[in-house]
Amino acid sequence: MEFALSEEQLMMQDSVTRYLADRATLDTVRGLIAAGPVHDAGLWSGLAGLGICGLLVPQEYGGAGMTLLDAMLVQEVLGRHVVPVSFIPTSVLAPLALLAAGTAEQKQKWLPAIAEGRMQVAVGLSEACGARDGAGVTVAGAKLSGRALFVLGAADAAITLLCSSEGDVYAVEQGAAGLERTSLRSIDDTQCLGELNLHDVTAELLPAGEEDVIPRLLDAGRVMLAADILGAAQKMLELAVAYSLERKQFNRLIGSFQAVKHLCAEMAAELEPCRSLVWYAAHAYDAVPEESRLMACHAKAHLAEVGRFVARSSTEVHGGMGFTDLLGLHYWFKRIGCNRQLLGGPERVREEAARVQGWI
Amino acid sequence: MEFALSEEQLMMQDSVTRYLADRATLDTVRGLIAAGPVHDAGLWSGLAGLGICGLLVPQEYGGAGMTLLDAMLVQEVLGRHVVPVSFIPTSVLAPLALLAAGTAEQKQKWLPAIAEGRMQVAVGLSEACGARDGAGVTVAGAKLSGRALFVLGAADAAITLLCSSEGDVYAVEQGAAGLERTSLRSIDDTQCLGELNLHDVTAELLPAGEEDVIPRLLDAGRVMLAADILGAAQKMLELAVAYSLERKQFNRLIGSFQAVKHLCAEMAAELEPCRSLVWYAAHAYDAVPEESRLMACHAKAHLAEVGRFVARSSTEVHGGMGFTDLLGLHYWFKRIGCNRQLLGGPERVREEAARVQGWI
Amino acid sequence: MDLAYSPPYQQFRQEVQDFLEKHRQLWPPRSSLGKPSAAMKNWQALLIEQGYTARTIPAEYGGYGGEPDILKSRIIAEEFTRAGAPGGLAGQGVSMLVPTLLEMGSEEQKKHWIPRTLSGEVLWCQGYSEPGAGSDLASLQTRATEDGEDFIINGQKIWTSTAHEADMIFCLVRTEPDAPRHQGISYLLFSMDTPGIEVRPLQTMTGLAEFNEVFFTDVRVPMHSIVGERGQGWQVANATLKHERGMLGDPDIAATRLNAIVQLMQEETVDGTRLMENPLLRDRLLQLQSRVLAMQFNGLRLLTAQIQGADPGIARLIVKLQGCELNHQLAALAIDALGELGILYQDSPRLRNKGAWQRSYMFDLGLIIGGGTAQIQKNIISEIGLGMPREPKPAAASGGAR
Amino acid sequence: MDLAYSPPYQQFRQEVQDFLEKHRQLWPPRSSLGKPSAAMKNWQALLIEQGYTARTIPAEYGGYGGEPDILKSRIIAEEFTRAGAPGGLAGQGVSMLVPTLLEMGSEEQKKHWIPRTLSGEVLWCQGYSEPGAGSDLASLQTRATEDGEDFIINGQKIWTSTAHEADMIFCLVRTEPDAPRHQGISYLLFSMDTPGIEVRPLQTMTGLAEFNEVFFTDVRVPMHSIVGERGQGWQVANATLKHERGMLGDPDIAATRLNAIVQLMQEETVDGTRLMENPLLRDRLLQLQSRVLAMQFNGLRLLTAQIQGADPGIARLIVKLQGCELNHQLAALAIDALGELGILYQDSPRLRNKGAWQRSYMFDLGLIIGGGTAQIQKNIISEIGLGMPREPKPAAASGGAR
């Protein structure tokens, strides 16, 4: 019985942290996204050098063959540093989709490239958790038509995985005839979102999929987004405490005012159990599959709520400075706000949790 | 343009307050309800002496012919003093029902007795806002059968007004054959609730009712319950502030701690706009009927929420003493908690507000 | 209780409506707070002439010179809002400096500055807050030292909106460094063209630069630029700070936003179903509607108290705290209702409402913090509204000891 | 991360299950915290013999004398809960006095009191809080003055559960009135039969008298009744107060309640529709489920840290605050779901669950307040967990000045 991270996991998290500490400072990030949403290839190749990009890719395809728990720990660090890389679609959702539904040939074609960090994959799952503006992708004669919104991942992704309205997963190559991609720009320029319009686009089915390929991908994606919020919110709490121990008003450190102390205490009290919830959800994904869906829903929904509370409260503790661009606190604020809505807002996700439990 | 109470209204509220200040102290109330839920006849006749019982009864029937706004102001004071009298069913719902749907004869028979404080009327509206345990009253051959739960008013009410499942209002006399009354006991012994079981009970239809008699009664009842919460919650806030200015811990008045100050400030900030909302809802009942339903729903729902917050927070400010029976703070706490559920909890009532606005 | 307006007021309302209708072609485009356009200046002159702005300011200072009439002011505001017509100039010069001068200025200052400010000829910015002096404004450090007939000013201000366009600044500076902190401050008026002033735009989390930082390096200002006496600046500023706080938290703004969300939820769909059909979103909407209505009626109560010259007490003190929070919550609901569409921003395709919901969500958080943080508001409510004690002064000056 | 138990532990679990099954006929009726029945005493003796209670207490003091093994303790607790079997004695004597004596008592005190306490022969109550000393326990005023070989005690205690049945009290009294307040307190053990002690039941908002007030008038107690040294009572008490706080906020209790609400919402109807069909109630239930799960997994983390001898930091400090609030919110949901049925209480017809939801709603609020109020908990989290400064001491002793 041990509910804790292993030595190896702590070392891996630490190595990513150390890599990012120098290379993904706030000033660096600020510069990278100055012109709009970005997946930064430089940081990506650095992460590839650490073996991070192929974390979930089996060793036979050149990856590390690790679990979602490990990937989650990486994502927590990426969130903590608001790093502009598309780890979730390329290194988590794409390998999981290929492993669950891809042919041997498809795996051979794409997994090694992913593991080496040579290829980006975008993933469109938004319509599986609530289609807006009439979006949706249909299949006719093995060709895809329609529209996919809020596709996760870099603009230059070599392939995009899309879910059809029948629940199958297709791979579409960049530059395919009839495919048009537009960038969507969110509050958070550290994450890339795209809109795909498709007119009879040639696509490759991932054929081995069982019924729940897409739900499983959603589970994984939601755990990862929860982990990202966890990292970002933890950082915002730490920044708030640190600021309150520097800033004086009325001849006192503001951190000595009960109102400020209690706000920080409430953030900590809300956030700390979230860590265990996200750990468990990630652990359950591989180790307790029958609980996976429920735990992923709870992790995503609860982190969305707690993340919003922490983002707002930390900003309040920072006073006017928190509202300016000077300290850059808003990069975390926006990342948390963006994650809240991706792959289903909290109410929607909780409703799924009710269904999973047979309550309705 | 004047959104304020008139001199007359202030004087009336003041006269009720002065009457109750001596006669409905906490110790008196505590004694009155020691053995269970009570409508106190002594206090009632005192209120009758002030002309309160017939406030809504037209002058031709011996009453004061005033508006719901006036009745609401009385209820606020009754809530403030947690007075164990059944003002809402007897002096508000019954006259309104008779005026809206009663025959001349019915009015003549009952309204003067109500105005003089000689008669109690119980009113059952619970099934119109959500039937529990399969309750409901049906009519066959002009006789009533079924069950009405959470009937408001004294156990010895001379008549009970019930709503049938068709939406009509009937009067049933105490002691009618086939009628059986059981007391229900809630957390709040200052309010009387009963269960009526009916087997072919002779009843008198209030025949002139238009379609919305029952909705109008619900509006009035909800505004009154909101006013009761307003009075009780205002008192709880005042008690909290007063206690915080007496009690010392760590060599300081607890009212000088920011945590306590801010909790009191939040109570005040939540409660103060409620006063205007309840005023407006009561005013609209008579003066702006097209807004009456919406405002009654909002007043009831919002006061239920704010009341719960204030009841809990005031108890917290009182620390352990708030939890004991010694200070008796819980009498207000329970009255607020009871009112929250009567005639529809907040979610239910808000849903009605959505329908009123044609949103669904 | 009577919410109807008496016939003379009904007639006045009609006059305002007629005026707006008749002069629709003169409405200037909605202005930001910066330099007014020529069309705006003309409109302002017309409004003053009608008494629809600067209503109670004496004619000798360029105002309309009417008697105070709170109901007429309210009617004007209501009708301008209803028609969507641009109101009079509303920058910090008009809303803060002019009342200050009327109360505390010399006759010469009133005659000189008020007409020019009302007409839009002179644009002002406000120099109060400093990086180290926010909630605790009285700790401000910008120093003015005497040099002959002049003050020499050094220091920094922040949160200075329109500083890059303003002609003039009204500014708090510390002139008596050895006096107790509330008694060492003076209130100065000087030109933004004075050498030694540098304005840097201050970008906020919204991505816009709604404010500026202003740096003073040996800025030379004549000593007669002072309003009130030396060392009286704190009292002079406080006379108008209350005006600023009064402007925040207007429930009518919340009501307008609520209506916009109702429309949004009626029109937008997810999986083909109207958002309004979602019981969870609908219940949140209704909870906020309760609050908006309560604050609107609270506003009616304040208006009545104002007419009657009564002290509305707590009903007044809570407006900023509750109103700003309400606006923030409304924006949050709109974002949640829109889901992934709700996170779009800037120039994105599929952006709704030009990104206003996200911008409000952030800017309203700024308002919760600014103009007296929520924490300061709660101090005020508990101390002034509920009579609770101030925090005791710490025994040692530092709060850092464990 | 490995949530499985190794084979020896699986075997141990099986042993516990077998034991419980085999001795089912010996299970005493669930006891309150008062005087144990003969059946309960026998059961307690059997549990000690098996090492299922008093597991790590040395055999010479009447315990089982086992090595500490957190997992085995956890397994015992889990299996007793799962089977619905009564655990060992859990009054304040066993849970607070015994650990205190083990840590701070004299050999004679240990030998005398621990066996009698464990066996159920002696029932204890706790005399810590006073009407004027709640959050600020160190300000307690109950005075013990020297008189020959004895102390003479005068004063009052409150929140003393089981005082009316207890044989003995462990009690904090002020023995050195002139010492600094934390250094003038002593920890005494004495009989509740001592003349001059009056116990009055303390009724709470639930309508029950879960606690008592205890009044001391010239109560004469031998000086050798002290645990530790004179003036050391604060340290002696603190050694065990942490045990008390650890008991509050158990997430498994919350999980049990959550399940009860799920069942309630599946079974109860309004207008013939299951409550579970109501999206608003369901969403509240799910929000609370998120929190219950998070706290349960937080508990797993604490357990692991305990096994590893690591400091779990904030994860430990938040348990009381979050756990008690969660229980209160769960009760609130159950009440709201039941609507008008939810307000029934006492002996009312149609009462659900014997009124437990309302009783919890109130009692849990008491727990939020008691054992360190929510405000004190937040002080602890911010100061110990986050390293934020204590409040500065006020310059003047009174907080009442404006």
Image: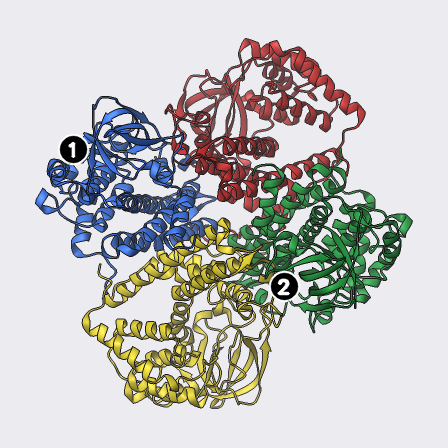
Chain colours: A green, B blue, C yellow, D red
Mark 2 Cα shell of 10 Å, populated few (<14), some (14-19), many (≥20): many
Q: Position of residue D207 (x, y in %)?
A: 39, 27
Report whether B161 appears left or right of D241: left
Give the amino acid type for the residue marked by disc 1 in the picture: Met
| Residue on which disc 1 sits | B119
Mark 1 Cα shell of 10 Å, populated few (<14), some (14-19), many (≥20): some
Report whether D20 appears left or right of C324: right
Q: Position of residue D73 (x, y in %)?
A: 69, 25
Report whether A142 appears left or right of B243: right
Single out the residue that lies furthest toward the front: A141
Report whether A267 appears left or right of B240: right
Q: Residue at x 86, y 48 (%)?
A: A58
Q: Which image quarter holds the N terminus of chain D?
A: top right
Q: Chain of mark 1?
A: B
Height in image: D162 above or below C363?
A: above
Q: Chain of mark 2?
A: A
Q: Position of residue A27 (x, y in %)?
A: 72, 69
Height in image: A149 above or below D51?
A: below
Q: Position of residue D26 (x, y in %)?
A: 61, 10
**SS at mark 2 in the image:** loop
| Residue on which disc 2 sits | A329
Q: Residue at x 41, y 74 (%)?
A: C237
Give the amino acid type for the residue marked by disc 2 in the picture: Leu
**SS at mark 1 in the image:** loop
Task: Name the one closer to the observer, A172 or C132.
Answer: A172
Q: Is any part of residue B83 visible from this angle?
A: yes
Q: Which image quarter holds the C terminus of chain D?
A: bottom left
Task: Name the one closer to the observer, C41 or C257.
Answer: C257
Mark 2 and mark 1: span between their CA atoms? 67 Å
Instruction: Name the quadrant containing residue A130.
Output: bottom right
Q: Is any part of residue C157 visible from this angle?
A: no
